[in-house]
Image (cartoon, helix red, strand yellow):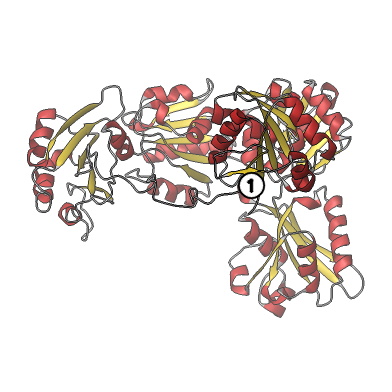
């Protein structure tokens, strides 16, 4: 929300308005009073201001009695789809009332944000928000889904807020469906196959799908843009006939036309007017591919004729697969004759990221504390059917997030082949699989060898980053590892032990920068590391030897670089040790410019936003 007016009618209200303006930097503060604030606009009449600006604003915050707010906006209210979000704050900042355009206009969220700023109580009366259930009327726009309904939205909303039994069908997966799965109300039952639904048991049907369904009960369809269409055609192709025919073909195949995400063809069709018109009118991205790129794709229906004419086995199937990233087609090549002289082919594939099938989540579990897993990592861990974790590096308490019927295995005593075999078994069943890695998977995580196998076996996977032990070390040491004008770089490395280091990487070379050094896997060669560091660091440089950071048995040893080897020897720790070296440890000098009163930046320009501007 950018165009915001904060309207105050009392001196107390003006003070609150000025506080809010700092949180909404481009907002206007308006009053009829004379004030000492140079960012506040004093105007003759609030009514006149609203006469000229009500429809131009995205949000209005009244700091006044609710009655004043209502009387002033009443003449201007037109439609909930176009009216601005209006909220009202009392003079003491105790309550924030959502007044107008609660959902679509964003007044409910506006009220909650203002209440958070003031430490006030938000007053929301929208039924779905009060019950903390989905706002079906804006859910589609939140996740860029198209919306269709078989009865009025008011009827659907009434059924939902009255908690009538609802069947929810999820044919794809994206951030929206993950949100629905995570926040499902008790009266909603989730299905992943329409054949499993007994419609006689439900009063409302909701689907997130690219497929057309025709249930006998009131229905709401959320249509995600997940379909990629490839096409080839004759030289002449009428734009209108092409679009009408393709729409008919989609309906006949039981697919929502509005689910089309992108459209593609071979590069010699880059100027095909029918394709250009189709994509422009439907706001669809048009892409073309070279014959060389098309020939990298293996298709189920190659054509000798097309190969002889343009040097590729086929256009529509290849382009659909290239656009979607998928290896399978939803609709194989269809040959369509519009009339005797005009024809086209089309094929359809689903965006590979939206396909609901088994995946492997490689998740960074953090440094040790089970609560330092990311929210996203915890969510996937809670939903997983099979979890593999290294027991020596990840606390067993982390597995308490797993659901009761999940298969949870400690991989410490398993070979990589045994781990992959177990994951394959669950993958073939379509189960959700999690591989828990300590810290962040990108650092000494040994995941590249796993990903190589997954790639060879064509198993889908993704990575969820985690908090590394070097970040946890900074927190435990109450230190910022980058200090203005002292050190602005962090080196994450290891000493050379049994595993050789690359020729150009060594402790001494990195030490020459005097950057903050975070040295992993090197407790056993501490004396060697100390000698290399002393080539460039002062002997009194602070060091910290950190054992199992954030674990329950964490131990921290601090000193100076000249005593590093002795500190490690005295600790008797040889594994799961991080050595930190640098002048940033415990430093409390050199203020950052970010919050200096003289420093101006995009969020604090000192520019005054007043009505006269």
The local crowd at label 1, few if under 14, some if 14 to 19, many if 20 or more residues have their Cα within 10 Å, is few
* Quarter occupied by residue 132: top right
Q: Give the camera-side residue of 66 and 212.
A: 66
Dot 1: what SS? loop
Measuring from the top left, give residue 499's x and y in whole percent. 21, 49
Residue on which the image places disc 1: 2
Identified at 28% across, 51% down, the residue is 488
Q: Is residue 94 visible?
A: yes
Measuring from the top left, give residue 537's x and y in whole percent. 12, 50
Q: Give the camera-side residue of 361 and 112.
A: 112
Q: Residue furthest right?
A: 339
Identified at 83% across, 38% down, the residue is 77
Residue 544 vs residue 591: left or right?
left
Q: Is residue 196 visible?
A: no
Q: Residue furthest bottom?
A: 309
* Quarter occupied by residue 470: top left
Q: Is residue 35 above or below residue 400?
A: below
Measuring from the top left, give residue 137's x and y in whole percent. 77, 36
Placement of the N terminus among the 4 image quadrants: top right
Identified at 81% across, 70% down, the residue is 274
């Amino acid at each position: 929300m950018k165009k915001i007016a904060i309207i105050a009618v009392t001196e107390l209200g003006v003070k609150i308005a000025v506080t809010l303006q700092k949180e909404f930097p481009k907002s206007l503060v308006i009053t009829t009073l004379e004030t000492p604030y140079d960012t506040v606009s004093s105007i003759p009449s609030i009514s006149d201001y609203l006469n000229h600006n009500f429809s131009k604003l995205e949000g209005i915050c009244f700091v006044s009695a609710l009655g004043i707010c209502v009387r002033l906006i009443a003449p201007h209210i037109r439609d909930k789809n176009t009216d601005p979000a209006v909220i009202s704050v009392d003079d003491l900042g105790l309550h924030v009332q959502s007044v107008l355009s609660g959902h679509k206009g964003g007044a409910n969220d506006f009220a909650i944000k203002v209440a958070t700023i003031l430490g006030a109580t938000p007053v929301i009366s929208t039924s779905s928000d009060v019950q903390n259930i989905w706002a079906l009327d804006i859910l589609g726009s939140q996740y860029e889904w198209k919306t269709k309904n078989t009865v009025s939205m008011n009827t659907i909303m009434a059924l939902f807020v009255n908690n009538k039994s609802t069947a929810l069908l999820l044919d794809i997966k994206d951030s929206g469906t993950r949100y629905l799965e995570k926040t499902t109300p008790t009266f909603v039952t989730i299905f992943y196959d329409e054949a499993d639904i007994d419609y006689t048991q439900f009063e409302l049907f909701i689907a997130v799908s690219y497929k057309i369904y025709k249930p006998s009960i009131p229905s709401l369809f959320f249509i995600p843009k997940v379909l990629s269409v490839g096409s080839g055609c004759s030289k002449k192709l009428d734009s209108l006939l092409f679009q009408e025919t393709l729409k008919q073909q989609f309906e006949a195949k039981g697919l929502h036309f509005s689910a089309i995400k992108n459209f593609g063809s071979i590069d010699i069709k880059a100027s095909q007017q029918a394709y250009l018109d189709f994509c422009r009118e439907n706001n669809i991205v048009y892409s073309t591919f070279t014959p060389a790129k098309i020939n990298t794709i293996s298709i189920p229906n190659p054509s000798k004729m097309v190969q002889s004419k343009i040097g590729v086995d086929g256009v529509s199937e290849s382009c659909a697969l290239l656009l979607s990233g998928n290896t399978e087609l939803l609709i194989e090549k269809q040959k369509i004759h519009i009339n005797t002289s005009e024809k086209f082919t089309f094929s359809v594939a689903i965006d590979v990221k939206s396909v609901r099938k088994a995946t492997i989540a490689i998740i960074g579990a953090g440094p040790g504390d089970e609560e330092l897993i990311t929210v996203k990592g915890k969510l996937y861990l809670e939903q997983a059917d099979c979890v593999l974790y290294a027991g020596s590096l990840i606390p067993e308490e982390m597995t308490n997030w797993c659901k009761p019927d999940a298969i949870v295995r400690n991989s410490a005593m398993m070979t990589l082949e045994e781990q992959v075999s177990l994951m394959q078994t669950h993958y073939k069943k379509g189960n959700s699989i999690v591989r828990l890695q300590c810290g962040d998977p990108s650092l000494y995580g040994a995941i590249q060898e796993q990903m190589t196998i997954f790639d060879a076996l064509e198993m889908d996977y993704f990575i969820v980053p985690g908090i590394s032990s070097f970040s946890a070390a900074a927190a435990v040491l109450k230190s910022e590892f980058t200090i203005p004008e002292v050190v602005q770089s962090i080196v994450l490395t290891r000493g050379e032990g049994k595993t050789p280091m690359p020729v150009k990487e060594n402790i001494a070379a990195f030490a020459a920068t005097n950057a903050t050094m975070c040295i992993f896997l090197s407790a056993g060669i501490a004396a060697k590391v100390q000698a290399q560091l002393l080539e460039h660091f002062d002997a009194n440089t602070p060091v910290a030897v950190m054992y199992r950071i954030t674990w329950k048995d964490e131990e921290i040893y601090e000193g100076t670089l000249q005593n590093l080897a002795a500190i490690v020897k005295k600790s008797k720790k040889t594994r799961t040790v991080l050595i930190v070296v640098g002048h940033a440890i415990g430093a409390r000098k050199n203020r950052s410019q970010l919050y200096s009163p003289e420093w101006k930046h995009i969020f604090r320009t000192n520019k005054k936003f007043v009505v006269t501007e």
